[in-house]
Image: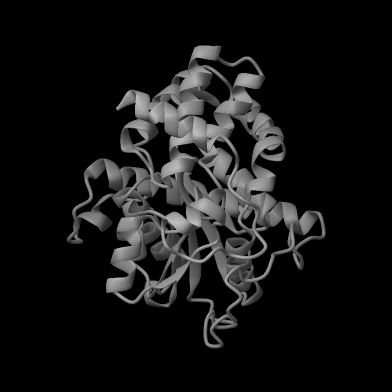
């Protein structure tokens, strides 16, 4: 694992656990990206991508000067939940585990409520996210990493593949076409994030690292969840290891929690932004994109984007449940 001293010489608000989480995520991301590249080469896919991108959802042409073709000092970093994919990957993963009888109906109900709130509000509730992570760790404890990776492939096909935002996917493809590396950066487990990155033809993923011994999960994390400042530390560590110039890199997110990560790069984008991020982005003249449709887009005051499916049903029930809990 990288030396912590590299970070302690920098002024920042991140905790030691954030730094540890960021280092662990960067180390895991570099390892898995090499493995993905080797697999692609063996399969004869080095010159192509797993899936085709859509078009710009807002109908605007991409800026001619960005991304810069052939700029190997630049890369792109994409948040996952509600930026690349509708909803939260951890909740979709929990749904798949329930189907395979990893836990009981009561725990599924908690996952379902958290997911309904996330999709309704469009923001991350820290209490919900922490509860979901604790539940996931207790569920996978004692299981082999290889077993969860295999199951994760199935869960992606069942619950995640049709929830990818075409507009965001097109942005990622633009960076790939320019010859740049593209990384997911998410609080989701690194194994889940790596599966999604591979399926989308991306370079790799920075994600929360769960401790394992001899290939078996212990039920503990390395550092803390890759969230907020920890994401920024992971991007900083990866950029240093890869020899990237952060001023030439881009980052994309929907959440104000990712302002530390977005502020690191020279090209920050607010994608499907929550209210706080939208205000922050407008104050700083960051680029914005919104690929949501229907009532959700109207709620945040941004015109609906063409070509993207409407938000999933269940909103009315979630609203009613939320009112009863208030």
Residue drawn at x 51%, y 41% is: 88
Q: In this view, does 71 lie above or below 8?
A: below
Q: Which of 223 and 120 is in front in this view?
A: 120
User: Where residue 155 appears, x then y in whole percent?
Assistant: 67, 34
> Which quarter of the figure has residue 208?
top left
**As displayed, is residue 65 above or below residue 273?**
below
Q: Does residue 133 show up?
A: yes
Looking at the rendered image, the quarter that the N terminus falls into is top left
Seen at 43% across and 54% down, the residue is: 299
Q: Which residue lies furthest to the bottom in this view?
A: 64
In the rendered view, would you say 108 is above or below 60? above
Q: Which residue is drawn at 24% across and 53% down?
A: 5
Taking the spot 57% from the left edge, 34% from the top edge, the residue there is: 92
In the rendered view, would you say 99 is above or below 231? above
Instruction: Judge by depth and name the residue closer to the eye, 274 or 96.
Output: 274
Q: Quadrant of residue 103?
A: top right
Q: Which of the two residues, 186 or 129, is positioned nearer the viewer here?
A: 129
Colouring convention used in this rendered image of the protein: one colour
């Amino acid at each position: 694992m990288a030396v912590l001293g590299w970070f302690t010489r920098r002024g920042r608000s991140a905790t030691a656990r954030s730094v540890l989480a960021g280092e662990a995520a960067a180390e895991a991301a570099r390892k898995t990206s090499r493995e993905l590249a080797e697999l692609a080469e063996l399969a004869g896919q080095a010159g192509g991508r797993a899936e085709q991108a859509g078009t710009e959802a807002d109908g605007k042409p991409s800026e001619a000067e960005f991304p810069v073709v052939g700029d190997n000092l630049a890369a792109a970093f994409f948040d996952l939940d509600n930026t690349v994919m509708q909803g939260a990957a951890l909740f979709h993963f929990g749904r798949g585990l329930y189907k395979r009888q990893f836990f009981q109906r009561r725990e599924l109900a908690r996952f379902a409520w958290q997911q309904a709130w996330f999709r309704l509000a469009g923001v991350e509730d820290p209490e919900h996210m922490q509860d979901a992570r604790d539940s996931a760790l207790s569920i996978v404890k004692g299981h082999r990493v290889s077993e969860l990776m295999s199951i994760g492939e199935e869960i992606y096909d069942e619950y995640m593949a049709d929830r990818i935002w075409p507009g965001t996917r097109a942005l990622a493809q633009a960076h790939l076409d320019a010859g740049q590396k593209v990384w997911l950066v998410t609080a989701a487990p690194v194994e889940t994030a790596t599966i999604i990155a591979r399926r989308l033809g991306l370079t790799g993923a920075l994600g929360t690292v769960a401790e394992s011994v001899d290939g078996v999960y212990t039920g503990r994390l390395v550092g803390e969840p890759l969230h907020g400042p920890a994401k920024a530390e992971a991007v900083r560590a990866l950029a240093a290891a890869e020899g990237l110039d952060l001023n030439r890199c881009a980052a994309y997110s929907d959440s104000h929690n990712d302002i530390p990560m977005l502020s690191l790069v020279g090209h920050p984008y607010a994608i499907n932004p929550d209210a706080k991020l939208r205000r922050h982005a407008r104050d700083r003249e960051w680029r914005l994109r919104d690929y949501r449709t229907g009532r959700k887009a109207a709620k945040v005051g941004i015109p609906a984007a063409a070509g993207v499916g409407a938000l999933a049903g269940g909103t009315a029930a979630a609203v009613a449940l939320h009112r009863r809990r208030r």
